[in-house]
Amino acid sequence: MTHTVMARSQNGLGDDERRQLANVPIGQAIRRRAAITPDDVFMREQQLGVYVERTWAEYVADIDKLACGLLRLGLRPGQSVAIMGDPTYLWMLADAAVISIGAISFGIYTTCSTDEVAHQVSTADAVIFIAENQEYVDKLLTVDDRCGSVRQILVDDTQALFDYEDPRILHLERLLHPESPYTDNERRELATLVESTEPDDVALLVFTSGTTGQSKAAMITHRNFMVGGAYQFCQVFPDMTGPGERPVICHLSLAHAFERIVCLYSPILTTMVVHIGEDIEQLTPTVVQTQPYYFHAVPRIWQKMASRAITNIDRSSHFKRWSYRRAMKVAKRYRELQWSGGRPSPFLGAQYGVARALVFLPMLRKFGLDRTVIGLTAGSHVPEEVQRTWQYWGLNLINGLGMTEVGFVAFQRGRFPKAGSVGQKVPDLDVRVAEDGELQYRGAGVFRGYLHEAERTREAFTSDGWFVSGDVGTLEPDGELVLRDRKKDIMITAGGKNITPSLIENTMKGSPYIGECVLFADGHKYPTALIELDSEVVVDWAESRGIEFTGFTSLTQLPEVVQLVASELERLNQQLARVEQIKKFRILPKELEPEEGDTTPTRKIRRSQFERMFAHLIDEMYADELQEMEQFR
């Protein structure tokens, strides 16, 4: 049994209260918020189909119990604790309890390989490892010989651990409900530690994605994520501060800096109420049940949802296909007139109103997004075609830019901004453009440095203290920040032409059938690409046409599928300059998997590893060049 969540009224905080809370350590801020609004709902978590509410007062009471338990186990300020699992209430509790003590919390992506788990745990010298279930305990134990610092393994779900004999394993519930109650002395010790923590102390580690090598541990202070993250979020999106409850959904990994800021720390300053569904893989039912005011997702999720909707339309009745095409013609005229600075006529406005009511709103309702006021995409570049499509449908999808080392950098503002830029910089962040086009930042969100990486920390800053982002971009006269590419990723063809791979890759990902595109051009006569299919969409496409296949690999080899991708690339190539157009491609015979090393836990391409894994496909595309070189040998 499931049900739609009913929002409750909340009064929120005043501007001065928000500013004060943002400038104290996280543990203190949580407790002060609970003192101001003890009965306001902090979060709802679905259990057996029912959403269970927790108020701010209940949240703090549980944090204090868990923190006392961690102190009893010997955790001390400055020590590190790893947390591995999907988003849950206990994940949130663990993070808050560790930080309250003055210890350092860090999350590990559930998709990390065992080698990456060993690297992160050993780099951080984690003394406690908190796992959601057996799967993540096993990942640690597989590399236990490289994780000698771990003294205790705390587990939320211990059902599958009945025959494990490791004495370090302990049910997390035993800390929340100990056999021996916590004493007044233990509670006083905790209170002292909470109050002795400083805003510029390191609160947590966030490991970088590691696209060019091993991940680095960025040291993040309380001030970095409270002022450079949560408070900036409030300033950019004042609607999130109330009045009234603002439902949001926690569905991305809490190891990610963005999800931490939005779902763990921004609620301290706002009327946001975090919702967690029962199954993280079943996002759509959660969205439908919670009806979020604000919904954020990485570009891949926005793209997959849009692709699914378009595929469903293609498989529907002739009348529905005709209605959608007519509605899209009206929507494109309406939005493009707005984006060019014009004002739609009353007649065009009325046409769009009808199209939205009869065609687009029913589509959004199926996703649970018909009441969503703000849609945000961040984490990587969203294809412009995808962003425009959601805006045609009437969902205000905007771009945001943030960095682990900086916090929030920029957001688009207003309703239905033009696709392309990442928006205007956030307040209180200084931005400058270096002579080579690199964007550089300075502000409260800029991190302390990389743990045990003094040389890399020095390389991350200019001599006068600005963080070097590695992004090439421009700051437009109207204040818009536009990203062009990663500084180190610019490719130069054999003809000496500079190519921006991310621009081309994102253009190709505007196709509903393409999940990932990886470009190759450096030192070659022409660009080529390896394509990962969007399996769900292409499977639906093939089945609707009665095309038979036995599995994913056989699907990728079908002539009809190869022709489908070829036609999509030909269509999208028209948006590019001739030198940028993809001349050859190959379809990957497998779906990308972070645990196999082809992508990071956040699905960013590890290009060097990727090139090694698929070298035979790349060589096929450049066979003519290889043959040409043979005559010189």
Image (cartoon, helix red, strand yellow):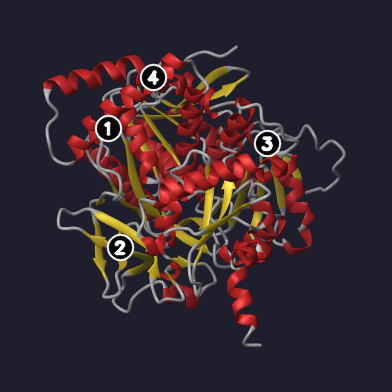
Could you tell me residue 343's position as x and y percent? 12, 32
Q: Amino acid at mark 2?
A: Gly
In the displayed structure, 549 sits above or below 438; it is: above
Between 234 and 487, the one nearer to me in the picture:
487
Q: Dot 4, how many residues are within 10 Å of its Cα: few (below 14), some (14-19), or many (20+)?
A: few
How far, Cα to Cα, is label 1 from label 4? 16 Å
When asked about the image quadrant of residue 56, the answer is top left
* Residues at marks 3 and 2, CA–CA distance in whole angstroms: 44 Å
SS type, badge 4: helix
Whole-angstrom CA distance, mark 3 to mark 4, is 51 Å
Which one is earlier in the sequence, the residue at label 2 or at label 4?
A: 4
Residue 224 placement, left or right of 84: left
Q: Earlier in the sequence, mark 1 or mark 2?
A: 1
Give the alpha-carbon distance from disc 2 to disc 4, as whole Å.
Answer: 41 Å
Residue 370 appears in view: no
Extreme bottom residue here? 633
Label for residue 332?
1
Which numbered disc flags the more N-terminal residue, 3 or 2?
A: 3
Q: What's the residue at 39%, 56% (across, down)? A: 503
Tag nearer the camera, 3 or 2? 2
Residue 384 location (% of width, % of height): 36, 45
Mark 4 lies on residue: 322
Q: Residue at x 18, y 35 (%)?
A: 337
Along the horizontal axis of the image, is 416 left or right of 94?
Answer: left
Which residue matches tag 2? 473
Mark 2 residue element: strand
* Residue contact between numbered discs 1 and 4, judged by CB atoms under 8 Å: no
**From the image, which quarter does the C terminus lie in?**
bottom right
Distance CA(mark 1)–CA(mark 2): 28 Å
Q: Secondary structure at mark 3?
A: loop
